[in-house]
Image (cartoon, rainbow, N blue to C red):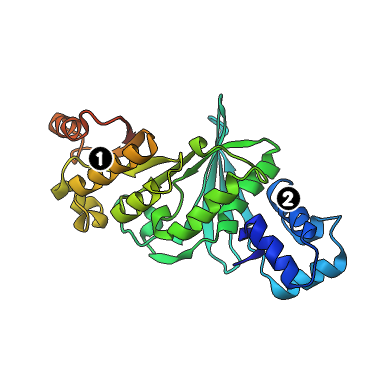
Amino acid sequence: MDLKSMTLQEMQEYMESIGEKKFRAKQIYEWFHKHLALSLDEMNNVPKKLKEKIEQTQEIYGVKPVDCFISKIDGTRKYLFELYDGNIIESVLMKYKHGNSVCISSQAGCRMGCKFCASTLGGLDRNLTPSEMLSQIYYIQRDTEERVSNVVMMGTGEPMDNYDNVLRFLELITSEDGLNISQRNITISTCGIVPKIKELAQKHLQITLAISLHSPNDEMRRGLMPIAMKYSIDELLDACHYYFKETNRRMTFEYSLVAGVNDQPVHAEELAGRLKGFPCHVNLIPVN
């Protein structure tokens, strides 16, 4: 595990393992997660010899900015970042009255194969590390000099397919020793990996789940999303009910409206029947 992905306790254990005092871990942890340092070079109270020792024994993964596109309409910013291995990911900053929201990527590529998603065209290259997910937020907060208050995991990749790293990311981004973003201000979007939804429910976090549904029935959904070949809508909704029962968190169902495919009154009626009585929001997304 790279240095920036460690918890404070793990960093303390690492410092002791290389013959250093535990307080150095607190210094470095806060440089990374409170002061948003991009490298050891920025840490002016960490001795040069310790920096050299760390560089010899640890990797520090981050992101390198490639480009930024700013909307003339609402100021939304789309960032392109390069990872250490040359992979390119994207993040988006959206400004609202209630604060700044950042949409981040969780994987380089994606293997879910959803028909309407461009990030899956080349398949999955690899999972992002917790530090690479954090670094997207940290860089954007440094760049804008404005606090990020909300995080949405709807960029490249399927977060539930990178489950362990996403859990570690959540632990670090909500830590009081870091940015301390509220769990209630974090949304994870998933195409519906049923076992992972149930597993996350058992963590009793206050994360909001957004389910990519896009269809009111299995036949149509299988044509749009290969994951539907493995888990039916009934199985998915059972997992959603379990998540709500364990967390008391209202869910969001994402529904992309494709002209002539899933946008007819009969589809609306079928969807309403599926979700009747379930505390949730439905987000309608016009595609064409």
Compared across the picture, whether 241 is left or right of 201 comes to left
Regarding residue 287, the answer to whether it shows in the image is no
Give the quarter of the image for residue 276: top left
Residue lying at the far top in this picture: please name it: 97
Three-letter code, disc 2:
Glu
Regarding residue 279, the answer to whether it shows in the image is yes
Compared across the picture, whether 236 is left or right of 267 comes to right
At 23% from the left and 37% from the top, the residue drawn is: 259
Q: Secondary structure at mark 2?
A: helix
Give the quarter of the image for residue 124: bottom left
The numbered dot on residue 30 is 2
| Residue 31 position in % (x across, y down) | 75, 52
Q: Nearer the viewer, residue 240 or 97?
A: 240
| Residue 254 position in % (x across, y down) | 32, 39
Give the quarter of the image for residue 281: top left
Q: Secondary structure at mark 1?
A: loop
| Residue 41 position in % (x across, y down) | 80, 60
The numbered dot on residue 258 is 1
- Count residues near mark 2 (Cα–Cα under 10 Å), then give few for <14, some for 14-19, many for 20+: some
